[in-house]
Every structure is written in structure tokens, then in C-alpha cells.
Image (tube, coloured by chain):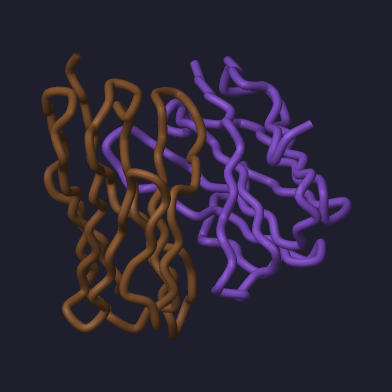
Chain colours: A brown, B purple
């Protein structure tokens, strides 16, 4: 059974700092991995989608990497801003059996002015 | 209209009430999903519809009844719920179920409180 873990559960940084959020998964047989952002009480906004054959994806100040063999992904946020404060979730499409998108519990990020 | 729209955004109901959540997507997608998000737990997949046909029921209690009249609309009918069903219910859509290269797009969610 696929399990997705995100560490740390919460992170507080000063504005302007570069930071890394971590996501690990137990079953490397995945189709892709997706990073989402969720603001309090709101839905999820897709940030980046990495196919299993890819190593990384970039969008603006965000860079996501994927190491499928070791079951890890990182989301790098450059020059963090208070507006980046949110919960960041990663999810993996798992192959085999009951194929579905499995989510981590998320990392709650606070960027202080 | 943008993306995926859910109504109502907030709902309070008693355990004997019957209510429905509505989801509409304007992305031309063929797959729609219901997810449940409870405090301190990962998102849980409830149902998947692909081209209006239910393809996944993730052992959801029968007090939750989904309906998908067409590829753009998805409902979740609620009756005789329990307080532990209080959660944020999220609707999502993608191009097609099991088209794994596609992104999932979510609505804003419906916050349900069962008294």
C-alpha cells in the first residue's frame, strides 16, 4: 500500500529565505507526482506535475525534483514571500492494484515578513 | 466561470437532514472525483466518475450517494450523516480517469458540519 510522507509538518521562515519541502513515498511504481498548494479553508491549487520519466519541473520561483528510485521529491521555493504561506501537499499516482492518487498530509509553511 | 465550482461553500446539517453538494467543471474534462479532507488526515478519495460512469467507490458508507448526470456535473447526496462526517469535501476533475499524465484540478470545497 502506497504511503506518502511529508516532512516537516510545519515550517516557519523569514521572508526572502530559500526553502525545501520534502515528500517521500514507499512504492516507486508511480505514474507521476503532483505538488499542490492549499490556503486555509480553500481547495487545492496545482503547482507542478512531474511525470515518472522526468527529473524536475520548474515554474517561476518553484522547482520540483523527483527521484523515483529512492521514492523522494522535493519542492524548492526561492526567495520566499509572505504570500507563499499555505499548506503544500504532494500526491502520487500509483500503479497496480487500486490505482489512485495518494496524498501526503502536507507541510504548513509560514513566511514571516 | 472558472475551473471547478462547488456549492454550497458551507453547510450545517442535523443528522436526520437530507442535503446535496454540487460540483460543476468548465474544463471539458471527462473524469470527476469526490475527496474528503478531515483534520490531520490525508485527502481520502471517495468516488470517481469517468464519462458519467462510476469507476471507483472507495468503501464509502451508503449515507453518501453520488450522482453524475453528465461529464460536467457531479453531486454528492447526503442523508442521516454522523458528526464524524464533518469535513471539507473537495471535488476535482481531470481529462480522463487513468490517463495518468493529466493534472487534477480542484474546486474550493464545501465545508460540512454535522450537528
Give A9 or A19, whichever is nearer the viewer.
Answer: A19
Q: Position of residue A98 (x, y in %)?
A: 48, 76
The location of residue B65, given as percent across then percent down, is 69, 46
Above/below status of A15 relative to B41: above
From the top left corner, tell me how far across and down residue A96 is, in percent.
44, 85
The residue lying at 17 percent from left, 18 percent from top is A112
* A62 sits to left or right of A49: left
Q: Is B64 situated above or below B21?
A: below
Q: How far across and how far down the image is residue A90, in percent?
A: 34, 54
In the image as oriented, which residue stretches furthest toward the right? B69
The answer to which quarter of the image holds residue B79 is top right
In the image, what residue occupies the spot 24% across and 68% down? A25
Can you say which quadrant of the picture contains the N terminus of chain A? bottom left
For residue A26, side relative to residue B93 (left or right) = left
Q: Residue at x 41, y 28 (%)?
A: A39
- The number of numbered discs placed on residues in the rendered structure image is 0
- B41 displayed left or right of B65: left
Direction from residue B77 to residue A55 in the image, left or right: left
Write down the quadrant of residue B70 in the picture: bottom right
Q: Quadrant of the C terminus of chain A?
A: top left
Amino acid at each position: 500500500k502506497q504511503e506518502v510522507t511529508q516532512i516537516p509538518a510545519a515550517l516557519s521562515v523569514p521572508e526572502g529565505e530559500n526553502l525545501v519541502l520534502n515528500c517521500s513515498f514507499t512504492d516507486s511504481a508511480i505514474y507521476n507526482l503532483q505538488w499542490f498548494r492549499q490556503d486555509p479553508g480553500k481547495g487545492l491549487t496545482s503547482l507542478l506535475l512531474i511525470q515518472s520519466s522526468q527529473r524536475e519541473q520548474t515554474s517561476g520561483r518553484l522547482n520540483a525534483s523527483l527521484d523515483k528510485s529512492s521514492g523522494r521529491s522535493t519542492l524548492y521555493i526561492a526567495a520566499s514571500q509572505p504570500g507563499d504561506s499555505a499548506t503544500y501537499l504532494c500526491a502520487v499516482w500509483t500503479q497496480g492494484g487500486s490505482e489512485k492518487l495518494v496524498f501526503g498530509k502536507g507541510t504548513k509553511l509560514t513566511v514571516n515578513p | 466561470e472558472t475551473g471547478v465550482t462547488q456549492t454550497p461553500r458551507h453547510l450545517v446539517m442535523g443528522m436526520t437532514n437530507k442535503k446535496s453538494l454540487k460540483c460543476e467543471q468548465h474544463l471539458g474534462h471527462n473524469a470527476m472525483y469526490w475527496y474528503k479532507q478531515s483534520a490531520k488526515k490525508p485527502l481520502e478519495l471517495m468516488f470517481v466518475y469517468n464519462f458519467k460512469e462510476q469507476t471507483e467507490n472507495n468503501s464509502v458508507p451508503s449515507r453518501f450517494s453520488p450522482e453524475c448526470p453528465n461529464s460536467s456535473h457531479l453531486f454528492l447526496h447526503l442523508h442521516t450523516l454522523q458528526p464524524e462526517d464533518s469535513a471539507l469535501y473537495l471535488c476535482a476533475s481531470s481529462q480522463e480517469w487513468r490517463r495518468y499524465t493529466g493534472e487534477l484540478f480542484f474546486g474550493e470545497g464545501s465545508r460540512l458540519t454535522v450537528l
